[in-house]
Amino acid sequence: MTTYNVKRCVLALALALAAAFAAVAAAQTSVADLRAAVQQNPQDAEMWTRLGNAAFEADDPETAKDAYLEAIALDYLLGDAHYGLGLVEYARGDYQGALFAFTEVTRLFPDRFDGHYNRAVTLATLRRPDDAAAAFRAALAAAEPEATALDRLNAHVGLAGQLVLTGDYEAAAAAFGDALQLRPDDTDLAYNRGAALVSAGRGLEALPELTDVESRTGDYRFSVLIAEVYVDQGQIDFALRALERAVRKAADANDRGGEASSLVALGELQRGLGRERAAAESFERAAQVDPASWEARYNLGVSLLTAGQTRAALAPLQEGARLQDTGIESELALAGAYDQLGMTSEAIASAQRVLERAPGDTEAQAQARFVIGRGLYLQGDYEGAADQFARVVQVRPGSAAVQLWAGLAQYMQGDFEGATLFYERAVQLDPNSIEARVNLGAAYLATARYGDAQSVYQFLVQQNPQDAESHYHLGWAHYAQQRDEDARIAWSAACQLGYQPGCTAPRR
């Protein structure tokens, strides 16, 4: 989507191992009987495999693993033993061990569907989507004649899910399409294919099918997705109507979560159109419909922040942060609200929670550290503040505000040279920032760069002849260069503007 943040959610794909054993006809034999059998004939690899199968089905993974390892030691080419070992290792949470076992199945028996499929599921669990997608493709290539229609369906869906994670939405849409051929009436598959096409920039192509399914079902998600297509095409009125349909469909189905999420999407679109009051009303309705929706409270709080109602935003953001106990959006917005209100300790605490919850989110970490840095600065911990700002600068070197605050922290520690570098960069990034220029002038004075300080303050008084403090500091820049008459004129201007230090500045 290019303009407004209308939400959609691709179906969360629950992948599961194919746990059927390929060559075991009689799985009812008891573990005890099979253990006795292998004791009588310990060289029988097939019997060890059957013991492993029975122990696995009896939820005895340790016995199963030992049995499979014995079978493999006796006959390394026994594919069912490798396969069963993979199932056991996966069930025990040893995914690397499971991956090795299933990889051996595919290496020794490249035409075996279940080996490729379970290897794909294991790779997906290990969050290796590119490799998992390749493995699902290998499973589909080996599907005939072993795999059932359900097996092939699961493989297509698994492939599509991994392709979504890699951002290959074109291929994901094709995979969902293949799955739909096996189950044409599955609305989840139809929705996910449509969502993938929209993400691939082919929303118009998906629109006829989405509209057809929307007209035949009460599934609100299709209306939300259709709204996104209309937004991408600049058809805002159509998008608003589609979202209103989504709200009605979810309400008719008594789906409170769906109704709330549709209202949130409607509110986001309204906010993007500058209709702040309507957006706030949509978010409030969403919170009433689904009290467990953190998104409703978070978005209501953001709307209030945008409208300048920072204190009013606290309550919904606090509730959103409580409901979203593992996420960061609400907590990050709350930290910003506390910061704006001067509630320094609360701002630092919220930002610290963001750092703990999102160690890998570079941008969120930068936002949180900026809040923490400001808080530490206001508490007088300039060294701690400088450390936080230095980390933020690495992520946001193009932010004038970050450069300015980094300079302030260095200046307060007496590192005037370091502060000067930050202030100069801040002015380069935002030449219109009076605050950055004022602080740069002070740093130049502190480092005895009086000619540079003179240039800064002359610029400031030219921009604003009523700036008494800049007249005063301009006087010091002249005085340090022994331009006494120029200094007297600048100080007199400061004095006439009511700045008392200009009236008592030294005279020669």
Image: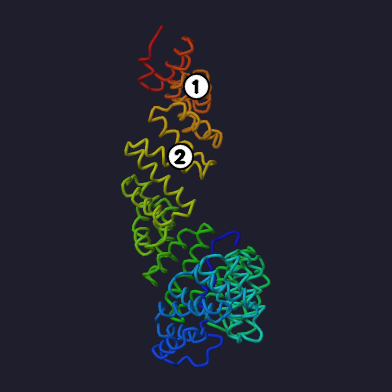
Q: Between marks 1 and 2, how big is the CA–CA gap? A: 25 Å
Q: Residue at x 44, y 82 (%)?
A: 56
Q: Is residue 395 visible?
A: yes
Q: Which residue is mark 1?
A: 453
Quarter in which the N terminus is drawn: bottom right
| Relative height, residue 466 to residue 28 (above, below) | above
Q: Residue at x 38, y 22 (%)?
A: 499
* Coordinates of residue 294 in the picture (x, y in percent): 40, 65
| Relative height, residue 303 to residue 14 (above, below) | above
Label whose residue precedes the other's in the sequence (1 or 2) = 2
* Coordinates of residue 38 in the picture (x, y in percent): 45, 86
Indicate which label's residue lies in the foreground, 1 or 2: 2
Q: Which residue is mark 2?
A: 390
* Coordinates of residue 53 in the picture (x, y in percent): 47, 84
Amino acid at pointer 2:
Ala
Helix or strand or loop: what does disc 2 sit on?
helix
